[in-house]
Amino acid sequence: MTAAARRTMAPVEDQLAVLMAGTEFGDPATGRTMERELRARLEEDRPLRVYCGFDPTRVDLHLGHTVPLRKLRQFQDFGHDVTFLVGSFTALIGDPTGRDRTRPMLTPEEIAENAKTYTEQAFAVLDRERTQIAFNGDWLSRLDFADVIRLTAKFTVAQFLQRDNFAQRYQAGDPIHISEFLYAMMQAYDADHMDTDVQIGGTDQTFNLLAGRQLQESHGNRPQVILTLPILVGTDGVQKMSKSLGNYVGITEPANDMFGKVMSIPDDAILPYFTLVSSLHPSEVDAIRTALADGTLRPMDAKKRLAEHIAAIFHAPAEAEAAREYFEATIQRRETPEEMPEHALGAPAMLVDVLVGAGLAASKGEARRLVQQGGVHVNGTRVEDAAREVGPGDELRVGRHRFLRLVSG
């Protein structure tokens, strides 16, 4: 590396303040160890090799998926080498327990198609020009059975049974599939193969990330630093963000929908959202924390700033500003917007069918639940019967921020 390249690296303390922000470890000792090891590598004054793996089992990303992407982007902004690793081989496993329907066993063709969409959406956060894309199928698919035996010899069953998830299932007599052990070993092989300095993942992946450290050490290499991040709670503030739970904020959603959903989060989720999914510097987040604590910033105003900031990440700033104005008019001042999406009807139809046909509900079942939960209004009045007829001239509101005008057509 040339002297000019070295001068581009920011001071170590400046980098640490940003890169450690939001990280969460199983115990304070692990956190101190990772910070110490990261500091040592940053002091080498060189671009670090950093990666995070993503199994393309889904095609539509939500804010929860962007948490590790945001951390990768922070490394990019400091001049480090970032790899977006597509789990083209590990995704073949799906969820061997059968419990997680969001992780089905996919074909190579499905994985390739999902990966294309996944990476395109990821560039809403990552810098396309500075992101390396890799596929672990390029090396894992070349391992023969002898290679796999040598890999498994680096680990013990006792180690795996120390993992909380495995231990609980073992005690309960629930099946634990060998492929689940192999998944962790394959993820460890990725880190070893790429000779990484830093791996990023969720706290639910801690065991697999530590397995990478172990495999690197077994080959006489310096173990990678692992930075684990908490799972982002959904808009309900309780359960993890999930499309199946309906508590998600999709990154391809219109700015108005995105703004409105962020505004629905509980007050105690404001700071985690600022920390994990915004591009604000930790010092700016600290200032917001202080202002909320001393009462100089109201939670409502903090959420507006958060919602507009997040909408601006995935849309033009002007669209984010317009989304704020739309929210203030339709929700806070309870005004019906003059302009709203329109849906053509040839004749009156049942509300449940219109909600599905207009894309306001994914299924009739979801449409009925929205009505039962009091989330659907027709001409300003809450609806209790999903089978009621609606027709041209009616105006629908679903939730707090989605409107629809029915027209003849």
Image (cartoon, rainbow, N blue to C red):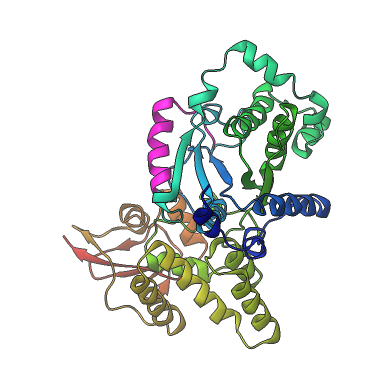
User: Image point 41% across, 68% down: which residue?
Assistant: 312
From the viewer's side, name the closer residue of 183 and 285. Answer: 285
The C terminus - image quarter: bottom left
Relative side of 140 to 290, left or right: left
Relative side of 351 to 111, left or right: left
Q: Is residue 299 magenta?
A: no
From the viewer's side, name the closer residue of 123 and 363. Answer: 123
From the viewer's side, name the closer residue of 132 and 85. Answer: 132
Extreme residue toward the front, this view: 3
Relative side of 289 to 340, left or right: right
Q: How many marks?
A: 0
User: Image point 58% across, 50% down: which residue?
Assistant: 46
**Picture quadrant of residue 216:** top right
Q: Is residue 116 magenta?
A: yes
Magenta stretch: helix, strand or loop mostly = helix
Figure check: 125 above or below 173: below
On the question of residue 383 being in view, the answer is no
User: Image point 51% across, 20% down: which residue?
Assistant: 141
Question: Residue 69's x, y, as percent?
Answer: 52, 52
Figure check: 315 above or below 145: below
User: Image point 38% across, 43% down: which residue?
Assistant: 117
Question: Residue 263's x, y, as percent?
Answer: 52, 71
From the viewer's side, name the closer residue of 371 and 188. Answer: 188
**Picture quadrant of residue 230:** bottom right
Question: Residue 125's x, y, as percent?
Answer: 46, 56
Extreme residue toward the left, this view: 409
Question: Residue 393's x, y, as percent?
Answer: 24, 71
Extreme residue toward the top, this view: 146
On the question of residue 137 being in view, the answer is yes
Residue range corresponding to the magenta coloring: 103-120
Relative side of 403 to 346, left or right: right
